[in-house]
Amino acid sequence: MIVTKKLSKTFSHKGTQQHVLKNLDLTIRRGGFTVIMGPSGAGKSTLLYALSGMDKPSLGSVVFDGEDLTELSQDKLAVFRRTHCGFVFQQINLLDSMSLTDNAMAPGLLVGKRKAVAARVDALFDLVGVDEATRKKFPGMVSGGEGQRAAIVRALVNEPDVVFADEPTGQLNSENSLRILDLFSRVNRAGQTVAMVTHDLNSALRGDRILYLRDGTIQGELNLGAFETADKDRRDRLAAFLEEMGW
Ligand SMILES: Nc1ncnc2c1ncn2[C@@H]1O[C@H](COP(=O)(O)OP(=O)(O)OP(=O)(O)O)[C@@H](O)[C@H]1O
């Protein structure tokens, strides 16, 4: 679904250059659940930004269903992202002047009818465990975890082809993390592709494939197979892989 060729990203700061992604050749399969792990600063978020067309690579290409994102204008990229992608990023970016419900509905209203969008948003809020009173509040009045779950509802409202998630359970307790992970597994089983960055083993177990990024290159890859349960064998395989990677 997404193929990168020699994907590179370099940041320049005060005359020095930092090569954050180095010549990555990588394929994200349609319907897969790819997890990206690696040490802090390895370039994981930068890779997610490049794969999703949120940021342009310095060199190389990102081809999404045959279309090279690096050649699209900003306007076309915006349409592309709106049509195909859902984003759960570390900065939550909810609009302060709108309730959680209105925030979550906003992308849906660009493409669907209010009643259908409202029903879908309600169903998603039920699944992520945000009660009706909280949904009516504004972002400044809710906890970080509630805001994060509203951002997840917003990301999923249009049933995007691909969901990009950067530490989606970062601010959540174990009960709410489990709800989000179950929701991601559910949308993935329904055919949506998921690409997720995480430091969390329980989250990573949901992936069918783990990529380990270090110093801007893919150091290793583990195929775990589709998630059914987080059983001992799956945990042991992931733990052994991460140990081998020096995690
Ligand atoms: N916009 C930017 N300008 C300059 N440097 C940047 C920018 N974005 C990222 N970097 C640098 O690129 C490197 C990789 O950052 P990135 O956020 O991709 O790492 P990460 O693997 O996601 O780390 P973490 O696990 O800590 O979130 C870091 O050293 C960071 O400082």
Image (cartoon, rainbow, N blue to C red):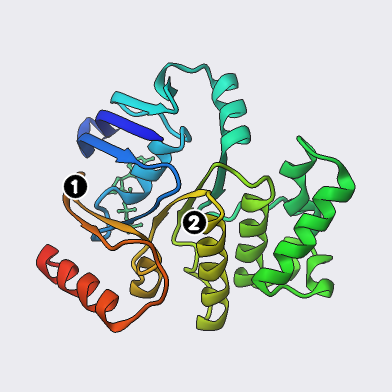
In the image, residue 96 above or below residue 58: below
Q: Can you tell which mark lies on residue 218?
A: 1
Q: Residue at x 28, y 33 (%)?
A: 9
Q: Is residue 75 above or below residue 23?
A: above
Nearest to N terminus: mark 2 or mark 1? 2
Q: Is residue 167 shown left or right of residue 151?
A: left
Residue 220 drawn at (x, y percent):
16, 54
**Mark 1 Cβ and ligand 1 under 8 Å apart:** no
Residue in view at x 39 percent, y 44 percent: 48
Residue 98 visible in the snapshot: no
Picture coordinates of residue 36, whole percent (x, y): 32, 55
Q: In which quarter of the view is residue 160 placed?
A: top right
In the displayed structure, 126 sits above or below 43; it is below
Q: Amino acid at mark 2?
A: Gln
Mark 2 beta carbon near ligand 1 (under 8 Å): yes
Q: Of 202 and 46, which appears nearest the observer? A: 202
Q: Residue 194: image x %, image y %?
A: 46, 51
Farthest-out residue, right:
115
Other-residue count near label 2 (Cα within 10 Å), few / some / many at <14 / 14–19 / ≥20:
some
Tell me the residue that label 2 is attached to: 90
Q: Residue at x 44, y 61 (%)?
A: 167
Q: Secondary structure at mark 2?
A: loop
Screen quadrant of the C terminus: bottom left
Foreground: disc 2 or disc 1: 1
Q: How many marks?
A: 2
Residue at 57% over, 34% down: 81
The correct choice, above or below, for 203 with respect to 212 in the image is: below
**Mark 1 belongs to which amino acid?**
Ile
